[in-house]
Amino acid sequence: TLTNLILRLYQPLSGEIIIDGYNINIVKSKSIYEQIGIVLQEPYLWNVTIKDNIRYAKQDATFEEISRVAQVACIDNFINTLPQKYDAIIGENACKISEGQKERLAIARALIKRPKILILDEAMSSLDSETEDRIINNIRAEFKDSTIIVVSHRLSTIKKLNMVYFLQSPSH
């Protein structure tokens, strides 16, 4: 997938991947990872507080930063309904929350480090169209200088984007 190519888990069959004028094959992996935020379709969350799950990508994040990205990811209203709010523990593999809530927490976690490149790889597949719209609009407003890459099979998602590329795997 595109995500695996950008993360250098796979090499392209031809051509090269250039980010900010640099071929990613000659840049240290750590440098690439520091610039990228990724949300996959099935995010993994830890059996810790909501606050700690979000701050995982930026250990020194302030509560204000955590709260802000939760707002951008449209998960703050849900969090504030919980008795322990951001200190609520979500259970092993987030068993105490819905799939859509997991996705929104994972989006907040990716946003906390303010990535220059945000990859949403089927990251909103459990969300309704209205919530997806709000999140995309929030990300666009808050991260104007970032590149947002959305991988999706949903036509409703693709219609919301400024530029669309259709990628096809080579026939085997």
Image (spheres, grey):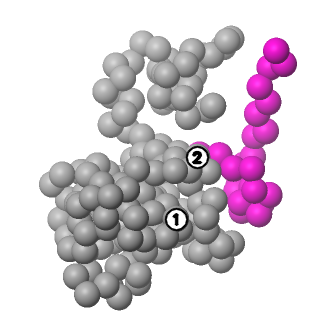
Q: Main secondary structure of the magenta part?
A: loop
Question: Can see residue 53?
Answer: no
The tag earlier along the polypeptide, 1 or 2, is 1
- Kind of residue sitting beneath label 1: Glu
Span colored in magenta: 147-172
- Kind of residue sitting beneath label 2: Asp
Question: Can see residue 140?
Answer: yes
| Mark 1 closeness class: few <14, some 14–19, many ≥20 residues within 10 Å | some
Helix, strand or loop at disc 1? helix
**Percent from the top left, x then y, of residue 29?**
36, 23
**Residue to which mark 1 is pinned:** 99
Magenta stretch: includes residue 151: yes
Residue for point 61% across, 64% down:
126
Q: Quadrant of the N terminus?
A: top right
Residue 60 occupies which quadrant of the picture? bottom left
Residue for point 40% across, 64% down:
95
145 or 75, which lies in front? Answer: 75
Q: Give the side of residue 160 with respect to residue 118, left or right.
A: right
**Percent from the top left, x then y, of residue 142?**
44, 65
**Percent from the top left, x then y, of residue 155?**
80, 58
| Mark 2 closeness class: few <14, some 14–19, many ≥20 residues within 10 Å | many
Do the CB atoms of the residues marked 1 and 2 lie less than 8 Å apart?
A: no
Helix, strand or loop at disc 2? strand
**Residue to which mark 2 is pinned:** 121
Q: Nearer the viewer, mark 1 or mark 2?
A: 1
